[in-house]
Image (tube, rainbow, N blue to C red):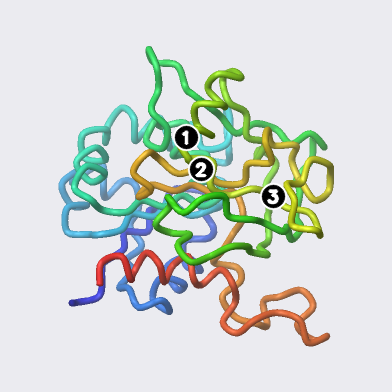
Amino acid sequence: MPAPRVLVLRAPGANCDEETAFAFEKAGAKAERVHINRWLESPGMAASFQILCIPGGFSYGDDIAAGRILGNQIRRHLNAAMGEFKESGKLILGICNGFQTLLKSGVLVEEERGEPAATLTWNDSQKFEDRWAGLRVDGAQCVFLRGIESLYLPVAHAEGKFLARDAETLAALQSAGQLVLRYANDTGEDAIDYPANPNGSEASVAGVCDATGRVFGLMPHPERYIERTHHPRWTRGEGTQPGQGLQIFRNAVEYFQ
């Protein structure tokens, strides 16, 4: 089969689009960086792509809230196009700011009566957290995480604390197998305390997928660890080749092969 085409969505303030496109290319896809204005002009253009990725950064300067403005653009102007993309069996990935956008646009987790089921809000530390975090995969539902049990990836965000609307919603997401990525401590258990849990996320949630497993959002940055030399202690012999983050992109490509 030909290499799947990836639409890497750019917006003012996004700053991880080039690295994300490179990671998909390294995994065997053909990636194209597309500005949000081009998609707004031609909503049907996404039909020629198999994967949509909203990368990290600070879309629109994180004004109002991280991912809010880009999420509203998708919600109000691209809802039909996004719905068609999602329902056609394709894949959608949101990384950091992209995760925030997918949640706040209603694409990732279905809303009830117009109310969001969950959000990503300010870190408990009330500051930007830039560190590496241990992660564990919880369940096998997510296409992007197939064959992966644990990860070590960098995080870089100020609004990464996952909060469900209420205890019932959190339990429902857990029961449906949608809380697929958790922050983990050195023993591999869910990280409750800072700094292993860098933001205070409820239930140690670092990533969430939709009910199909084909739409996935995560706060850590897999595109920043695709080579062994990306590891912070590679000069001491630590790290893997390729970097652990690359498998997430490979899984997306292999889904279409």
Q: Which residue is label 2 attached to?
A: 208
Compared with 123, 242 (above or below) is below
Residue drawn 24% across the image and 37% down it: 83
Q: Which residue is label 1 attached to?
A: 103
Percent across and percent down for residue 79 are: 27, 33
Which quarter of the image is occupied by the N terminus?
A: bottom left
The Cα atoms of the two marked residues, 1 and 3, are separated by 19 Å
The Cα atoms of the two marked residues, 1 and 2, are separated by 9 Å
Q: Secondary structure at mark 3?
A: strand
Which quarter of the image is occupied by the C terminus?
A: bottom left
Percent across and percent down for residue 238 are: 76, 81
Q: Are marks 1 and 2 in contact (CB under 8 Å)?
A: yes
The Cα atoms of the two marked residues, 2 and 3, are separated by 12 Å
Residue drawn 58% across the image and 26% down it: 164
Q: Amino acid at mark 1?
A: Leu
- Quarter location, residue 152: bottom right
Label 1 Cα neighbours within 10 Å, binned few <14 / some 14-19 / many ≥20: many
Percent across and percent down for residue 25 are: 39, 76
Question: Which one is earlier in the sequence, the residue at label 1 or at label 3?
Answer: 1
Residue drawn 63% across the image and 64% down it: 151
Left or right? Give the position of 169 relative to 93.
Answer: right
Q: Which residue is label 3 attached to?
A: 183
Left or right? Give the position of 197 relative to 205.
Answer: right
